[in-house]
């Protein structure tokens, strides 16, 4: 049997030889003092790609998101997002615990959000109501099966935010996948959002790191917030070098991951477990009408050397990434179809 095939998520990748070399030879300094040249170069590059003034390197996507939310929403004020958004699902209540932010959600629909529904939820200042200050969206959408929010929808949402004097945040952990899938320039996305968080350790394959992107004024404040949250780092250019290598070598190759995900989707489709089209590197499995539940399916595939992610009693997920070969995708398809056939 081949080595274990890990399709749980795209954070399980290991640095490539070229990335390891870039890390080993990185020029470094003390980033708390702003003296790490490799970090400074990474921040400038990412800001430029999104057409913003500045960016800040953070140790995790959750910290990057939470820094951005603190920039946009004062304690006691309100953030709107969808019910399956990462910022309210997978960040252990950080917006409330750290920042005193009140969150309200629209029904979880992944990438198929309706700006008119969002507009109808906005609360203005007045008579002790919690005022809405910001809207957050996720691109691509994790629990929405890697769905891509269409550019026209985002433009409408930007208009809604402007009409009501709100700010807009993008959890862009996998925005690189959206860029590759739809061909929308990163700078086009950048023009729509006041802040973005973008991740280097998912599809791009770096071992760690995300960035907050925004105006120079916001990022100056973000640097203070990062330090308050324990995210000040010293000779972190070793990690920033991995991010720079990933940006240079691993963005366009995301199309390969998308193609592999499409092959997996094609293999499992006859078993009635797909409810949405697969656009990027995530294949969601809905087992509501299947004899196997998610845990049973995961146990069956694990016994054959294939790891998948369980998101709920009847929901599982496959995620392709740069450490999975074409031969392993073929093997994974065989294992999945055999398990689903029972």
Image (spheres, rainbow, N blue to C red):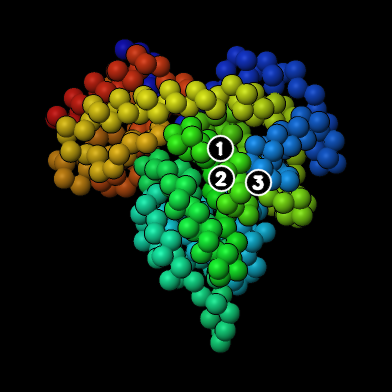
Q: Are marks 2 and 1 in contact (CB under 8 Å)?
A: yes
Answer few, some or many: residues within 10 Å of disc 1's Cα (few below 14, many 20 plus, some between 14 and 19): some
Answer few, some or many: residues within 10 Å of disc 2's Cα (few below 14, many 20 plus, some between 14 and 19): many
Residue found farthest to the bottom: 127
Q: Which residue is mark 2?
A: 189
Q: Position of residue 202 (x, y in %)?
A: 52, 33
Q: Position of residue 336 (x, y in %)?
A: 24, 27
Residue 187 placement, left or right of 157: right
Label 2, secondary structure: give it.
Answer: helix
Residue 155 placement, left or right of 302: right
The image quadrant that residue 169 belongs to is bottom right
Q: Earlier in the sequence, mark 1 or mark 3?
A: 1
* Residue drawn 32% across the image and 28% down it: 262
Q: Which residue is mark 1?
A: 185
Q: Is residue 236 visible?
A: no
Q: CA distance from mark 2 to mark 1?
A: 7 Å
Q: Select label 2 or label 3 by which is in front.
A: 2
For the image shown, how many numbered marks are present on the structure? Answer: 3
Q: Is residue 330 visible?
A: yes
* Residue drawn 24% across the image and 39% down it: 274
Disc number at residue 212? 3
Relative vertical location of residue 74 with respect to residue 221 in this rendering, above or below: below
* Residue drawn 52% across the image and 25% down it: 252
Q: Position of residue 238 (x, y in %)?
A: 72, 27
Label 1, secondary structure: give it.
Answer: loop
Disc number at residue 104? none
Image quarter hosting the N terminus: top left
């Amino acid at each position: 049997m081949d080595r274990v095939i890990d399709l749980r998520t795209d954070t399980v990748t290991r640095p490539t030889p070229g990335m390891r070399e870039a890390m080993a030879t990185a020029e470094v300094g003390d980033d708390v003092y702003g003296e790490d040249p490799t970090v400074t170069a990474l921040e400038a590059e990412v800001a430029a790609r999104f057409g913003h003034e500045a960016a800040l390197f953070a140790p995790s996507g959750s910290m990057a998101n939470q820094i951005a939310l603190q920039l946009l929403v004062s304690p006691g004020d309100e953030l709107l997002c969808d019910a399956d958004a990462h910022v309210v699902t997978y960040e252990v209540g950080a917006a409330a615990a750290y920042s005193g932010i009140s969150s309200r959600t629209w029904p979880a629909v992944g990438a198929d959000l309706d700006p008119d529904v969002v507009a109808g939820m906005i609360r203005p200042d007045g008579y002790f109501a919690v005022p809405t200050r910001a809207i957050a969206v996720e691109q691509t959408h994790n629990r929405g099966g890697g769905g891509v929010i269409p550019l026209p929808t985002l433009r409408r949402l930007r208009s809604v935010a402007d009409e009501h004097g709100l700010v807009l945040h993008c959890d862009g952990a996998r925005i690189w996948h959206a860029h590759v899938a739809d061909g929308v320039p990163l700078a086009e996305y950048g023009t729509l959002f006041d802040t973005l968080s973008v991740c280097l350790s998912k599809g791009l394959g770096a071992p760690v790191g995300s960035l907050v992107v925004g105006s120079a004024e916001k990022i100056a404040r973000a640097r203070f917030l990062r330090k308050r949250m324990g995210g000040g780092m010293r000779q972190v250019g070793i990690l920033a070098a991995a991010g720079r290598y990933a940006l240079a070598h691993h963005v366009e190759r995301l199309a390969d991951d998308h193609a592999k995900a499409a092959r997996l989707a094609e293999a499992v489709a006859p078993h009635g477990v797909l409810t949405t089209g697969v656009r990027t590197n995530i294949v969601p499995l809905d087992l509501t009408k299947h004899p196997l539940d998610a845990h049973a399916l995961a146990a069956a595939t694990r016994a054959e050397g294939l790891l998948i992610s369980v998101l709920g009693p009847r929901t599982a997920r496959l995620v392709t990434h740069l450490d999975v070969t074409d031969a392993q995708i073929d093997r994974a398809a065989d294992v999945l179809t055999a398990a689903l056939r029972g």
